[in-house]
Image: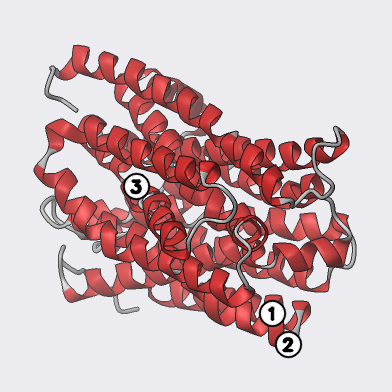
């Protein structure tokens, strides 16, 4: 049998492989954010309260975050190609279950499958970059994965939203499931873990008994803590907005029509694409100012939400758009955390540390989603508002994100001090 061809780093094949990986992540983001677009329809279909509705996304995010480290271990054992392909199949299965679900339990089960498949995509695509790209090209490839992949939300914001309104719940979610099957086929056909087939086979085995020791060593590293808290603090406001509460907030608190809300969410996604590479270049140029960049992005997000929350009545459309641009900045800026991982982590541990880091933003998102949902319902219980989606109720609920921001900022500052003590005052 003819041996599989060996390729070079930075070759045309390298760009083809990463393009397939980006496509898989693009679709994973579309699957991840689709429920946020359909949250109002889901409330009607499953007769769910705000707290019950948040359970869909909370469990999805919980599964995603909880599987990051196990996925990293499995990727080292079986390869990224197998994991990304399996993830696409899981997401397709989850959307099939959700499309046919007529009860809250089955709906939640579908989203759990989507979360599990989503978990197997991002870090596994990042994992192949060092093998296929040189040191000079790898950072740009990393930001491309995050930036272009996050553009997948456009698929849920425009065509999926339109299909949902035109054809209904079941056809819309079945269509997304079919796209995941397509992604699985492309990944299994064209993705490769390494330019050298022999080296790919050699690095797959991993002694599972050493996994715990590896994870503990990585968690104790100062740079791991900093990367975790940067991702925790920077990423969550964009994820919460895109994944769960963006559409309900725009339509109920700001009084927008479905078309206006879709336009604003489209602006949110385009901001990710436009700013992603610019932020990447800034991070590359100012390596010793990475903590400051992270704090500036966090501060901009806080100011944006403060403007929306404190504005009397509904804010002018231009103010909402400006705030959404500021909130959207958090997603591409969160890739800064993975740059910290690459700078201070031994190559043999990068997969594990990447998984630990990626947990951060989604743990924060989980906390914020829960706080917002429970606050909306609690205000009705206390008689402060008549409806869970009352505009005044949203003011209080969205302000709960500040608790998560403060927690993460303290974590960043404490861990940054440890990194500077270990690597020098200009390390971050």
> How far separated are the C-alphas under marks 1 and 2?
6 Å
Give the crowd class for mark 3: few <14, some 14-19, many >=20 residues within 10 Å.
Answer: some
Report if residue 191 is visible in the image: no
* Disc 1 target residue: 164
First of labels 3, 2 by sequence position:
2
In the image, residue 45 lies at what x, y percent? 85, 67
Does residue 321 lie above or below 279 as drawn?
below
Q: Quadrant of the C terminus?
A: top left
In the visual, does 365 lie left or right of 280?
Answer: right
Q: Secondary structure at mark 1?
A: helix
Q: Secondary structure at mark 2?
A: helix
In the visual, does 251 lie left or right of 149?
Answer: right
First of labels 1, 3 by sequence position:
1
Which mark is drawn over residue 106?
none
Give the crowd class for mark 2: few <14, some 14-19, many >=20 residues within 10 Å.
Answer: few
Q: Quadrant of the N terminus?
A: bottom left
Q: Secondary structure at mark 3?
A: helix
In the image, residue 382 lies at what x, y percent? 85, 32
Label 1 or label 3, whichever lies nearer to me, is 1
In the image, residue 337 lies at what x, y percent? 32, 39
Q: In the depicted view, which residue is nearer to us: 116 or 143?
A: 143
Asked if disc 1 and disc 2 are in contact, CB closer than 8 Å, the reply is yes
* Disc 3 target residue: 203
* Disc 2 target residue: 167
> How far separated are the C-alphas under marks 1 and 3?
44 Å
Q: In the depicted view, which residue is nearer to us: 253 or 155?
A: 253
| Residue farthest toward the front in the current orientation of the protein | 312
Label 3 or label 2, whichever lies nearer to me, is 2
Please name the residue shown 75% across and 47% down the image: 55
Report if residue 53 is visible in the image: yes
**In which quarter of the view is residue 304 placed?**
top left
């Amino acid at each position: 049998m003819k041996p599989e061809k060996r390729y070079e780093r930075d070759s045309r094949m390298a760009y083809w492989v990463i393009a397939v990986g980006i496509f898989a992540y693009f679709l994973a983001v579309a699957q991840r954010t689709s429920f946020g677009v359909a949250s109002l329809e889901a409330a009607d279909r499953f007769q769910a309260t705000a707290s019950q509705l948040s359970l869909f996304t909370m469990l999805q995010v919980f599964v995603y975050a909880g599987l990051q480290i196990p996925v990293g271990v499995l990727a080292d054992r079986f390869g990224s190609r197998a994991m990304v392909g399996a993830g696409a199949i899981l997401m397709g299965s989850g959307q099939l279950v959700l499309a046919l679900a007529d009860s809250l339990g089955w709906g939640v089960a579908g989203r759990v499958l989507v979360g599990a498949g989503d978990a197997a995509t991002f870090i596994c695509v990042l994992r192949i970059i060092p093998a296929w790209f040189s040191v000079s090209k790898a950072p740009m490839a990393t930001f491309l994965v995050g930036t272009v992949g996050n553009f997948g939300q456009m698929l849920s914001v425009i065509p999926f939203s339109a299909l949902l309104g035109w054809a209904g719940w079941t056809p819309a979610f079945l269509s997304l499931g079919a796209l995941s099957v397509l992604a699985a086929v492309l990944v299994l056909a064209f993705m490769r873990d390494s330019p050298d087939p022999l080296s790919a086979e050699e690095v797959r085995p991993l002694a599972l008994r050493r996994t715990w020791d590896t994870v503990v060593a990585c968690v104790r590293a100062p740079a791991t803590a900093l990367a975790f808290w940067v991702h925790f603090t920077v990423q969550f406001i964009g994820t919460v907005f895109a994944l769960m509460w963006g559409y309900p907030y725009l339509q109920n608190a700001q009084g927008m029509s479905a078309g206006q809300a879709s336009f604003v969410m489209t602006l949110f996604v385009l901001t990710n694409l436009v700013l992603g590479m610019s932020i990447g270049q800034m991070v590359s140029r100012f390596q010793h100012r990475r903590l400051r960049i992270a704090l500036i992005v966090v501060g901009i997000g806080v100011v944006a939400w403060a403007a929306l929350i404190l504005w009397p009545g509904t804010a002018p459309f231009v103010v909402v758009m400006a705030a959404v641009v500021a909130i959207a900045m958090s997603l591409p800026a969160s890739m800064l955390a993975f740059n910290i991982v690459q700078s201070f982590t031994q190559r043999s541990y990068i997969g594990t540390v990447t998984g630990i880091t990626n947990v951060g933003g989604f743990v924060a998102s989980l906390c914020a989603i829960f706080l917002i949902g429970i606050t909306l319902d609690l205000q009705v219980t206390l008689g402060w508002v008549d409806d869970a989606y009352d505009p005044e109720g949203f003011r209080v609920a969205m302000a709960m994100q500040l608790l998560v921001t403060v927690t993460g900022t303290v974590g960043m500052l404490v861990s940054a001090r440890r990194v500077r003590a270990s690597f020098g005052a200009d390390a971050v």
